[in-house]
Amino acid sequence: MKWLAWVVGFSLLASLLWAGADASGDWALPNFAQRLDLEVTNPGQNPVRTLVTLPVVATRRIAPGFPGTLAIVIEVNPPGSGFPATVIPSQADDLDGDGEPDEFEFPIALGPGESREVEIYYSTTLSGAITYPKEAHASHAYGYNRQTATLESALIGYRTYGGFLLDVQARRAGHVGLYNDLVGYLAAHKNFAVGKDIFHVGDTLGLGGLFLKRDGKIYRPPFNMPDYAHKPSAEEVPHYRVVADGPIRAIVEARMERWTLGEDEVELRARYSIDAGEGFVRCNFVVLPRRMATGHAYVVGTGIRDLPDEKLDNAPGRLDLAGQQSAGLGPLGIAIYYDPTQAHPAGNVETPEGGNRVVVFNQALQPGQAVSGSYAAAAAWSHTGIAAPSRYLALEQSQAEARVEVSNERLEKTPQPQRINGEAY
């Protein structure tokens, strides 16, 4: 009996020691020395499907060196699932171009109030490319026009060629894919299922165009001169940089180092992004006063152009209208989603080719005072298979506003360091 008690006691001690060495469960990737564990929660009452974005600087306070030279994300499945865990795609983004990642993201789908455990294995010694299916794309070219930036998910494409606004490249029903680069070489007057320019921007704010206003006068950023026009470019035009080319988020930066407004001069920057599976573009912008006369103050706003025979379906946080620019194209809808605590509707702004529904940001641009803000812009086309574009855009608002909470972040170390340099089994 003493022998049995000793065996039981030793087994219990061994199990406690093992639990202490690997309290978080199985170590799925033996070649990795460290792992960031976290919990992701949907605090809302609706299902969410979004990307979780981790700020690298803050995350490194818990997990030094994160995300290292190689990172792999595993989502822990609930009991009873066919597999204990699922590998999910991820990417790291260098937003400022200094060679260091600033954000790390991965997708998550959660029901109302649901929480999931996520494990991010990362290494500062391993390196190599992990290939995930590409679901978002950005480029700094459009056919023969290199003064254009495009970004897209498989659902829809957008492009900008100045004006700090968006144009739309839609796909016909049943033809999802990353086609923006291809569409740039297709004859615009012919119909192709893989993409069509369904939106006439004209001399307006287009979709999500930024503007400044002072003493009743509207100022809009200039357009670029297309390469194929074989004409010199103006000195003050937007310049573009592809920040991230997928696989799950595409990001483009637009920048004007100098924008002259009479005797004033400002700098304008905007970062546009689209996520895998999404139909809208997020925009984060900042306007900085470089030289501004005392007493001058500008309203900063964004808007969408009016459509013929349009129907409005606005709601708090959303400007939404549907109409038909030409009989051959069919109904389309355009929308802006904004934070009501940051901006508010401000009626109409007239431009040479029509009116525009606008929102303006609460903060004014003035000497020594920059203005920053964010919003999202979306378009929907009936021939994509969307029977009611306006209803679709209203539903997209909840997706654009989807948020998840990250908690219980902790760093774990491998319980078997001898396996780091061995075969992964």
Image (spheres, grey):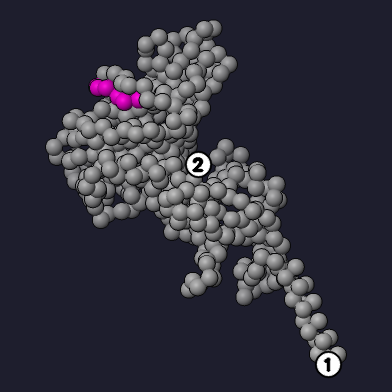
Residue 323, above or below 42: above
Residue 25, above or below 168: below
Question: Mark 2 = which residue?
Answer: 243
Mark 1 and mark 2 lie on one chain; the one further toward the N terminus is 1
Q: Main secondary structure of the magenta part?
A: strand
Q: In this orientation, does residue 26 appear?
A: yes
**Residue 330 lies in the magenta stretch:** no
Residue at x-position 59% and y-position 55%: 39
Identify which amino acid the numbered label 1 is placed on. Answer: Met
Query: Image quadrant for the C terminus?
Result: bottom right
User: Viewed as shown, does residue 175 lie left or right of 96?
Assistant: left
Residue at x-position 61% and y-position 39%: 98
Tag 2 secondary structure: strand
Q: Nearer the viewer, residue 307 or 38?
A: 38
Quarter assignment of residue 31: bottom right
Residue segment shown in magenta: 353-358
- Label 1 packing within 10 angstroms: few (<14), some (14-19), many (20+): few
| Real-space Cα separation, disc 1 to disc 2, in angstroms | 69 Å
Query: Image quadrant for the N terminus?
Result: bottom right
Question: Mark 1 = which residue?
Answer: 1
Q: In this orientation, does residue 180 appear?
A: no
C-beta proximity under 8 Å, tags 1 and 2: no
Residue at x-position 64% and y-position 70%: 26
Q: Which mark is residue 207?
A: none
